[in-house]
Amino acid sequence: MARRSNRDIRRRQIADALLAEIVDVGYDRATIAAIAKRAGLTPGLIHYHFKSKQAILIELIQYLQSKLESRYKLLSSRDTDARSHLKSLVSAYLAVEPDADALVVSAWVMIAAEAAKKDEVREHFETVVQAQTQQLRQLLERLLKHERKSTLGSAAFVSGLIASINGCYLLARSSPSVIVKGFSFDWLWQTIERFVACQPEVAS
Amino acid sequence: MARRSNRDIRRRQIADALLAEIVDVGYDRATIAAIAKRAGLTPGLIHYHFKSKQAILIELIQYLQSKLESRYKLLSSRDTDARSHLKSLVSAYLAVEPDADALVVSAWVMIAAEAAKKDEVREHFETVVQAQTQQLRQLLERLLKHERKSTLGSAAFVSGLIASINGCYLLARSSPSVIVKGFSFDWLWQTIERFVACQPEVAS
Amino acid sequence: MARRSNRDIRRRQIADALLAEIVDVGYDRATIAAIAKRAGLTPGLIHYHFKSKQAILIELIQYLQSKLESRYKLLSSRDTDARSHLKSLVSAYLAVEPDADALVVSAWVMIAAEAAKKDEVREHFETVVQAQTQQLRQLLERLLKHERKSTLGSAAFVSGLIASINGCYLLARSSPSVIVKGFSFDWLWQTIERFVACQPEVAS
Amino acid sequence: MARRSNRDIRRRQIADALLAEIVDVGYDRATIAAIAKRAGLTPGLIHYHFKSKQAILIELIQYLQSKLESRYKLLSSRDTDARSHLKSLVSAYLAVEPDADALVVSAWVMIAAEAAKKDEVREHFETVVQAQTQQLRQLLERLLKHERKSTLGSAAFVSGLIASINGCYLLARSSPSVIVKGFSFDWLWQTIERFVACQPEVAS
DNA sequence: AATGAATGAGCGTTCATTCAT
DNA sequence: AATGAATGAACGCTCATTCAT
C-alpha cells in the first residue's frame, strides 16, 4: 500500500513557482524560501525534489519548451492557410492574446540573461531557441512556397526574427517607453511581410 | 600642499572594472571585492568613491552613453553619403570592427537585464536607448529623403531595430549557435534595406 | 514526522542574549555574532528568527513589558494596604531586591538611549513607559484616597517619578559615585512621602 | 616668522561639531567625516588635532563643564536672594530659556549613555556631575539656612535632583509624550519646594 | 515525503584611523 | 597645518544548502 509518488506534481509546482518569481524579481533574487512559499511548500522540500536552484531553472526551461510544442501543435491543427498559421505562431511567441502565457514570455528574457552567464543553463536554453527557430522556419517556408517565392536565406532571416522577439521583450522591461503595447507584433509581422515581398519568385 | 584629487581617474578605473566584471560574470555576481581587485584597488576605496554598487553601474551607463556620442560624432565627420553613414552607425552599435568596444556591447545586454529589475537603473538605461533611437532615426530619415521615399513609420521601425540589436546581443551570449559572428549586422542591414525598398515614393 | 517548532524558545534565547549584551556593552556594540555566541547559536540563525537586529530589541522591549506586568500582578495579590503596595512597586522598578531583574533595569536605560535615536524603537519604548506611568499612578491615587488627600496633580507627579527612576539608572551607570546602592529607592520614596504629605486634604 | 598656532581654535571647532552631531544622531552614529564637514574641516585634520574620536568627546565634556561654571558665576553675580538664585540654576540646567544651550542639555544625556559604556569617558563625565552636584547643593543649603531649616539630608536630595534632571532629558527624547514642554522645570521646582517645606526648622 | 531549524560562506557597506603629499 | 585618498577590519544581513526529526 505504498503511496503514489507525487514527484512529478511537486516538480511542476516548484518550477511554476520559480517562473512566477522570475517574472517578479528575476532569477538571482528568486530565493528558495520565496519559491517554496509561492508553491505552498516548505524550503526543505525544494531541495528534496531538486538538487539545486539551477536544476529548477533547467526543469523550467524544458517545461516551457514542451508548452511551446503543444501550442505549436494546437496551432497546426487549427489554422488552414500558411499566412494565418505563421501569424498565429508569431502572435503566440509574443503573447499577444492576454493570457497566463504572457508571464512565460516575460520571464523568457530573464532566463536568457541567466543563460548568458551559466554554461549548463545555456545548453538547455539554446536547445529551446533552436526548436523555436525550426518551428518558425517551417511555417515561413511553407508560406514562401505557397506564394511561389524562393526560400533562399530564410534560415538566417528566422534567426534574426527570434533575436528580435527576445529584444522586444528585453526592451519592454528595460525601456518600456520605447516598446509600447502591441508594437512588437506589428513590427515583426511587417518585417516578415517585407521579407516575403522582397524574396525572388521561383520558376514553376 | 594639498593632495591633488584623483577622483575622476579612480571613478573611471572603477567603472571600467565593473564593465569587465559584467562581461565575465554579469552584474549580480560582480562583487565589490572582484571589482576592486580588477582595478588594483582595495574594497574600501570603492565605497569611498561611490556610495553604492548601483551608483557605479549608473556611472558606467552614462560613460557608455558618452562613448556612443563621441563615436557618432566621429562617424558624422567621416562618412559622406547617407547610406554609408547609416551603415557605419549600425556597424558601430554592433561592434563589427573587432576592438575593445566589443566588450561594451557585450555588457550592454547584461545592463539591460539589470535595468529590467531596478527602477533607478532603468531610468538611466532608458535615456541611452532613447538617444540611440534618435540617432538611428535621424540617419534613416536622411537616407529616405535622399532616396525620395516617405518617412512614414520610420520612428516605429527604428524602435524595432534597436530592440533587434539588443536581441542579437542577448542571443549571442545565451544562444551563440544561433547568432554566428557577423550575422547580426547582415540581418539588420538587410532588414533596413527592405524597409527602404518597401517605403512608398514621395511626389517631387 | 514534522519537526516541532522551537521558534518561541529560540526567540526568547536570542532576546535574552541581547539583554545580556546590552548590559555589558550597550546596544550599538552588541553585535549579532556576540549575541549568537552568548545564546550558543550561530549568527545565521539569529536572522532566521528575527528579520533584523532592531527586531530583537523590539521583542526584548515587549518581553520586559510583560515581565513588568506579571510582577505588578504578583504585587497586587500580595500586598494589602495601599502604602506597602506602592512601596513594592517602586521597589520593583528599582530592582532593590538583588535578583536577576537587576540586569533588566540596568539595561533599561541603554534601551532608552536607543529609543532616543530610532523612531520605531521609540514607539515601543514609549508604550511601556506609559504603562509604567499608569500603574504607578493608580497605586499613588489609591494611597492618596486612603489618606483622604487630593489627587490633584498626581499624574504630573508620577511622570516626574518615572523620569527620576530612569535618571537614577542612567547615573548609576555613568556616575556611580553619585548614586550609591540603595540610594535611589530611598530618594524616590521620600519624594513620594513628601508629595503625599503636601497634598491638601479633601473634605469628607 | 612661524604662524600662530591655531590649535585651540581648531579643537574648539571640532568639539562644537561633535556636540551638534550628538544632538542630531548620537555619539555612535557621529562619524568623523560628518564632524569634519560640520566644522568646515577635512577628515584628516580631525586626527591631526585629536588622537581619537573618544578624545574629542572627552574634550567636549570638559568644555561643557567650563560652560557650566561660567554660567554659574554669571548667575551668582546677578541674583540676590537665595530662592531666585537656586531657581535660576535649576532653570539653567534645564535650559528653560530657549537658547543655544538647549542643545547642550539635549546632548548631555547622549554623553551620559556613552559614559555608561566606556570607562575613560565615565571618569570625565563623573567629574562634571560631581561639580553640578556641588553647585546645586551650595545653593540649596544657602536657601535652607536663609529659611532657618535643617540642611540634614540635603546632599542626598541633591543627588536625586541631578538624577531627575538627567531622567527628564532622557525621557524627553525617548518618550516625548510623557515629558511635555516646561514640565521638567515645574516638577523639579515643586519637588525642591516640598523638600524645603518638609525640612525641620533649626533652633536659633 | 516532508518539515523547518541550522549552517556558514559571502555579500554590500561603514568608518576610525593612517599616510603620502 | 592641512589634504583627501587609502586602508582594512568589522558590521548587519542574505541565502543556497544541509540535516535531524
Image: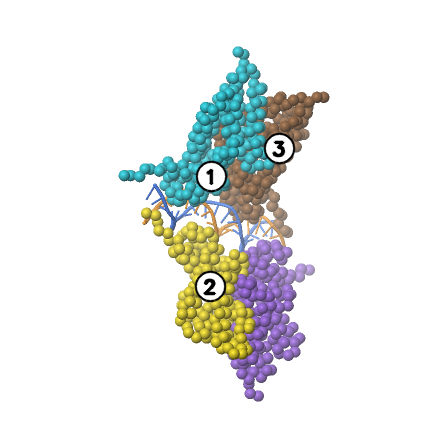
Chain colours: A purple, B yellow, C brown, D cyan, E orange, F blue
Image coordinates for residue B106, horizontal then vertical, percent: 46, 65
In which quadrant of the rendered view does residue B82 lie?
bottom left
Residue D124 seen by the camera = no
Helix, strand or loop at mark 3:
helix
Residue positioned 46% across, 63% down in the render: B107
Residue B52 seen by the camera = yes
Q: Chain ID for label 1? A: D
The label number, if any, that marks residue D20 in the structure image: 1
Q: Are marks 1 and 2 on the same chain?
A: no
Helix, strand or loop at mark 1:
helix
Helix, strand or loop at mark 2:
helix
- Can you say whether A117 is above or below D51 in the image? below
Q: Amino acid at mark 2?
A: Ala
Q: CA distance from mark 3 to mark 1?
A: 32 Å
Instruction: Looking at this view, name the residue that lies furthest to the right.
Output: C204
Image coordinates for residue C199, horizontal then vertical, percent: 64, 23
Image coordinates for residue A67, horizontal then vertical, percent: 61, 68
- Can you say whether C95 is above or below C37 in the image? above
